[in-house]
Image (tube, helix red, strand yellow):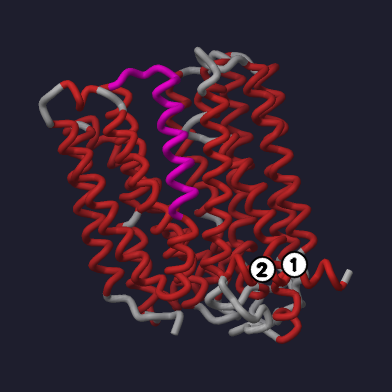
Amino acid sequence: MGDANASQSRLYEWLTGDEDSRMCRDISEAACREQPGNFFRHLLASLGNKLADELSSARLVLPWLLGAIGAPVWMVGLLVPIREAGALLPQVLIAGVARRLPQRKWIWVIGGLIQAFSAALLAALALLGHGGLGGALVLAVLVALSLARGLSSIATKDVLGKTIAKQRRGNLMGWSGSAAGAVTLAAGAVLMLFNDRPGQLALAVLLAIAALGWLVNAACAAAIREEPGATEGGESAWQSLGEGIARLRRDRAFQRFNLARALLLSSALALPYIALLGQNQGGAQLGGLGVLILVSGVAGMIASPVWGKRADASSRRVMRDAGLAAAVCCLAAAAVAWAPGAWSATIWPYALLYGALVIAHAGVRLGRKTYVVDLAGAEDRALYVALSNTLTGVLMLLVGGLIGALAQWIGSAALLLVLAGCALAAAFCAHGLPEVES
């Protein structure tokens, strides 16, 4: 057992670049002793979650599922808003309940189990669903899955803050992002083997594997060694919402962070439009889509560890630099779309820019996740994360519809110019944030 623990500590020190695994900041001595083991439990849990997310993607797998069962086309447009906003909107209401529990990992476990059950139901619907009723059931299950994702999200960050020290969290999220890139790479390679839309049996298999991924996530969460924390801050959901709004009014850094995060939504909103330009110019065959998925996987593997190390030094600068990179990618994609010549009529320029934007978006995600966890104190962390996510969920619903209408009016290429402007404003806003890692 001693040799195994020593090997685990050496591997932990190699992955984090830490010469002493007992060097800890802002966590207890007992949590510090458990940090190497908890690091790998978090990593495996994240891998299970990322695998499940990729294989139940609202941008990829679920649209095919609705098409395979003959659901009405308008239902496809509801998938991404339900998936994203459903996970974010309720979080501030959950935060007050979470603060009443001495161990928050059990909320994470419950969320993982509900997501696993939901994915299993989706697998069954892939085999048995049909028409409008089948599509409505898919949307209903997706609502449950998204709400469970919100449960897991708020608990994950709170447990991360209690079990992994400052200047180690970004590194952990970087390695998990790299593993997610590898999973995306594998998923893209498998999908390229299909000459046409996957059949219902293939979709059921993908969703069943997603269910297993969330079971792994729940099991690893349950295994995390989390010390009981204070419960004095526990309050009702509405009290939590009121407290969160009051904190937002008082904390200028938190205000500016949320403004930067809102503007950084541009990186996520731009991705499908670059993919759409590529499909319009290079053809909408599944092979082209597979190219985009493979490029996304490679970009994720490259980007996340680099951003993770930088986020531990300054998550503020990571948000700023990622915003600048996103702006450049949007401007370049618009330029390619308007450029003359046969070379711009293939998917490859868009695939390369899509990959570059995936790298920038990885920086956005790592930077803002690390920043909000390090900004908040131990007692306020769950509330800060939940309120920020809830505000982003509201904006996702409002801005998502507006962006879709704008794209219909001015076209995808012109819309990318608008999103580039938002990304530049985000970089400026992030530059003015205070440092929280020092």
Residue at position x 29%, y 58% in the image: 323
Amino acid under label 1?
Gln
Q: Which residue is mark 1?
A: 8
Residue at position x 58%, y 55% in the image: 176
Q: Is residue 376 above or below residue 393?
A: below
Q: Residue 12 bears which disc, if any?
A: 2
Please provide the residue range marked out in magenta: 282-303
Q: CA distance from mark 2 to mark 1?
A: 6 Å
Residue at position x 59%, y 53% in the image: 150
Q: Position of residue 278 (x, y in %)?
A: 30, 28
How busy is the neighbourhood of tag 1: few (under 14 within 10 Å), some, or many (20 plus)?
Answer: some
Q: Is residue 117 above or below residue 206?
A: below
Residue at position x 26%, y 68% in the image: 429
Image label count: 2
In terms of secondary structure, what is the magenta stretch mainly?
helix
Amino acid under label 2?
Tyr
Question: Regarding mark 2 in the picture, which secondary structure is present there?
Answer: helix
